[in-house]
Amino acid sequence: MWLESLLAYLHFSAILALVVFLTSEAALCRTEWMNAAVVRRLARVDLLYVVAAAAVLLTGLARTIWGIKGFGWYWSQPLLHLKFTLFVAIGAMSIRPTLLFLRWRKALAAGGALPPEAEVRSARRWVMIEAHLLILVPLAATLLARGVWTR
């Protein structure tokens, strides 16, 4: 029971970190707030977001391997596949903003240029889509945890 509790704690902590960093990106990525400090901060926050996403993935996999219900049960559940698919889709969507943040930081270091407003709006749009899709993951998780649509 201790292991299950520890795995759940680590997974929830990673999820909360992911939400914090994604929310921070959404808050910072605004045309009216864009300045040199924000460009540098966005690149750092995005790196922390990637680390948190990796922690969510690893702790989630750990729960399926060493958790009470076991690997076979979890991976036979459609809701786990939905959660995983959403997570991968969100991760794929995050590539575009990440590349923009890195390019902006490089341009800033090279000549002090701030990103164009259209790119800032585009990056924010992608981050907001990620954030809105992320809301569906805990819904699938709570349904799975309560045995809804389980095999």
Image (cartoon, grey):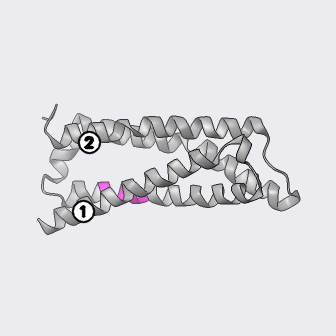
- Left or right: 4 as drawn, with respect to 58: left
- Viewer-proximal residue, 70 or 107? 107
**Marks 1/2: CA distance?**
15 Å
Q: Percent position (x, y) of residue 82?
A: 32, 35
- Left or right: 84 as drawn, with respect to 109: left
- Disc on res. 48: none
Q: Is residue 35 above or below residue 149?
A: below
In the rendered structure, does residue 92 fall within the stretch colored magenta? Answer: no
- Disc on res. 7: 1
Q: Residues within 10 Å of mark 2 (few under 14, many from 20)?
A: some
Nearer the N terminus, badge 1 or badge 2? 1
- Residue projecting furthest to the front: 32
Which three-letter amino acid code belongs to the residue tagged 1? Answer: Leu
Residue 53 visible, this angle: no
Q: Percent position (x, y) of residue 113?
A: 85, 52
Q: Residues within 10 Å of mark 1 (few under 14, many from 20)?
A: many
| Magenta-colored span | 54-60
Q: Is residue 69 above or below residue 93?
A: below
Q: Secondary structure at mark 2?
A: helix
Per the picture, the main secondary structure of the magenta-coloured stretch is helix
Measuring 19% from the left and 61% from the top, which residue is drawn there? 66
From the image, tell me which residue sits under label 2. 141
Q: Is residue 110 above or below residue 138?
A: below
Measuring 44% from the left and 35% from the top, which residue is drawn there? 133
